[in-house]
Amino acid sequence: MARDLTNKKHLFFDLDDTLWDFEKNSGHVLEQLFLEFDLADKLKTDFSTFHSTYKKTNLQLWIEYSKKEINKEYLRNHRFNLAFKQFNYDNYNENLLITEHYLERGPKGKHLKDGCIDTLEYLNKNYHLHIITNGFKEVQAIKIDGCGLRDYFKNIIISEEHNLSKPEEKIFRLAETFADAKTEECVMIGDNFESDIVGALNAGWEAIYYTEQKPESYSGRHILNLTDLKKLF
Ligand SMILES: [Mg+2]
């Protein structure tokens, strides 16, 4: 059962694939790099197969990173080669070069999720808005500034800066102190079920799951696009 949304004052947003269209922005750069480095020939596959393999590899590394089993350098410096190896291609140096280009270009993407600015403008009138993002400081800052998001948010909490990440309860408690908010006033809005939704609910917050397909196994509150938030608040 979804809890009541009255008395909510603070809305905390996830960044990647909630506000900033990571899938589109990242996919665009990966497709460029796939062409530039002639990966079709080297991996003997097409872009969409490579892209889905890369995403699975990257997701797994982020899970390990959030459990502190690997560090940032390992995640960055191995993810392309770990994906390559699944196509029987192993080239660590080329992997580093692609990483460098990817990190340079990726955060500069300008695609936001549909209705993002319009919804923030609307919510900003009556609520305090904040971001809690699992990510690296310099990368997330480029995304936030490049798309004109910064001015909408009172606090931007980036996991790397605090050595805490969602779904750890401590990052939600920390966010409350930054926002000067009470637990019962807080709502988390995000697309990652584990990090954003389970994390926030465990911390005693309300949570709104942003998912473009109606969830089959979750009966809690959800939205199919950002503009749905205007009906809730
Ligand atoms: Mg996300």
Image (cartoon, rainbow, N blue to C red):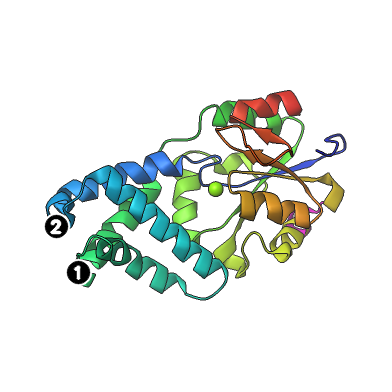
Where does the image place residue 123, in percent across and percent down from the top left? 70, 31
SS assignment at label 1: loop
- On screen, residue 194 versus residue 48, left or right, reads right
**In the image, residue 67 above or below residue 111:** below
Q: Are marks 1 and 2 in contact (CB under 8 Å)?
A: yes
- Residue type at mark 1 is Asn
Instruction: Establish if 194 lies above or below 210.
Output: below
Which secondary structure is most common in the magenta stretch? helix
Q: Amino acid at mark 2?
A: Lys
Q: Residue at x 69, y 41 (%)?
A: 218
- What is the tally of numbered marks visible in this picture? 2
Label 2 residue SS:
helix
Name the side, left or right, on which 137 lies relative to 166: left
Give me the disc on residue 225: none
Could you classify mark 1 by the number of other residues whose Cα lies within 10 Å: few (under 14), some (14-19), or many (20 or more)? Answer: few
Q: Percent position (x, y) of residue 112? A: 48, 35
> Picture coordinates of residue 155 (x, y %)?
66, 51
- Write down the region rendered in magenta: 177-181
Residue sitting at 56 percent across and 44 percent down?
Answer: 150
Circle nearer the N terminus (1, 2): 2
Corner quadrant of residue 215: top right
Residue 185 at x, y percent in the picture: 83, 45
Residue located farthest toward the top when viewing the structure as drawn = 231
- Quadrant holding the C terminus: top right
**Residue 207, above or below 212:** below
Residue for badge 2: 42
Res. 66 in view:
yes
Q: Marks 1 and 2, how far apart in space?
A: 10 Å
Q: Is mark 1 within 8 Å of ligand 1?
A: no
Q: Which mark is residue 91?
A: 1
